[in-house]
Amino acid sequence: MLEVCPAAGHNAESLRAFLGGFGALDIRLVHVAFFVTWFLLIFAIEIVKPTPDANSSTIIPAVLGLVGFLEIGLGFFLRSRFIEEAEAILQADPENQSAKQKWRTGNLLAFCFAETITLFGVVLKYLGYEWKIAGVFFGVGLLLLILWTPRQIAPMPPGVH
């Protein structure tokens, strides 16, 4: 077992329990990593400085926008399907491993869908599109990462079933 502060009697498990339990710390760290990569993608674009292309077609952003729109809908659907079901189970039984896995899966899927929208913006920038087009994808990706922040599941009060 990993010790965090042995003098105070704290270990990784007590830290996980303090920060939300059942892998919530792990999911929050992954969520932070997705935020960091969002900023690193902008940094990478600023380092490379792709040259704008005056002959850029409008079809590519339109197709990526349509795919992104469908992906956002799928992200909301899958996230709600996995997380809402898991939360209902975990409120009654906080140790249910299957529900914990569904909760993690729902959160990870949401993060991946949000990051994919951002990656569409990266593709557009590298293809020579201006920030006013690619930035929309970056903005939506960041908005989704904020919107899909993992929430802590409060157990039901004792005696309530």
Image (cartoon, grey):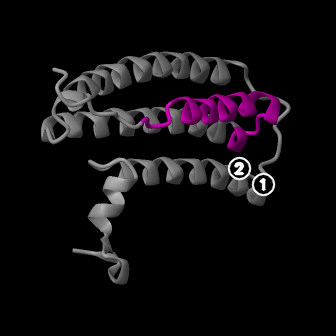
Residue found at x 57% / y 52%: 37
* Residue 129 painted magenta: yes
Residue 35 or 61: which is nearer the viewer? 35
**Residue at the disc numbered 1:** 46
Structural distance between the alpha carbons of marks 1 and 2: 6 Å
Which residue is farthest right?
54
When the figure is inspected, residue 8 is found, relative to residue 47, above or below; the finding is below
Give coordinates of residue 113: x percent, y percent. 46, 32
Three-letter amino acid code at disc 2?
A: Ile
- Choose between 19 and 53: the one closer to the eye: 19
Residue 123: in magenta span? no
Q: Quadrant of residue 94?
A: top left
- Front residue of 92 and 97: 92
Instruction: Write the residue at 72% across / 56% down.
Output: 43
Q: Residue at x 19, y 26 (%)?
A: 89
Q: Residue beneath label 2, please?
A: 42
Spot occupied by residue 129 in the image (x, y as percentages of width and height): 76, 34
Task: Please state which of residues 63 and 88 is positioned toward the viewer in this rendering.
Answer: 88
Rendered residue at 70%/50% (across/down) = 42
Residue 95, image x, y percentages: 15, 42
Asked if residue 111 lies left or right of residue 98, the reply is right
Quadrant location of residue 90?
top left
**Label 1 sits on what residue type?**
Glu
Q: Is residue 130 visible?
A: no
Give neighbour class at mark 2: few <14, some 14-19, many 20+ (Cα, 10 Å): some
Circles 1 and 2 in contact, beta carbons < 8 Å: yes
In the picture, measured across the screen, residue 46 lies left or right of residue 69, that is: right
Image: magenta residue range: 125-151
For residue 43, above or below residue 8: above
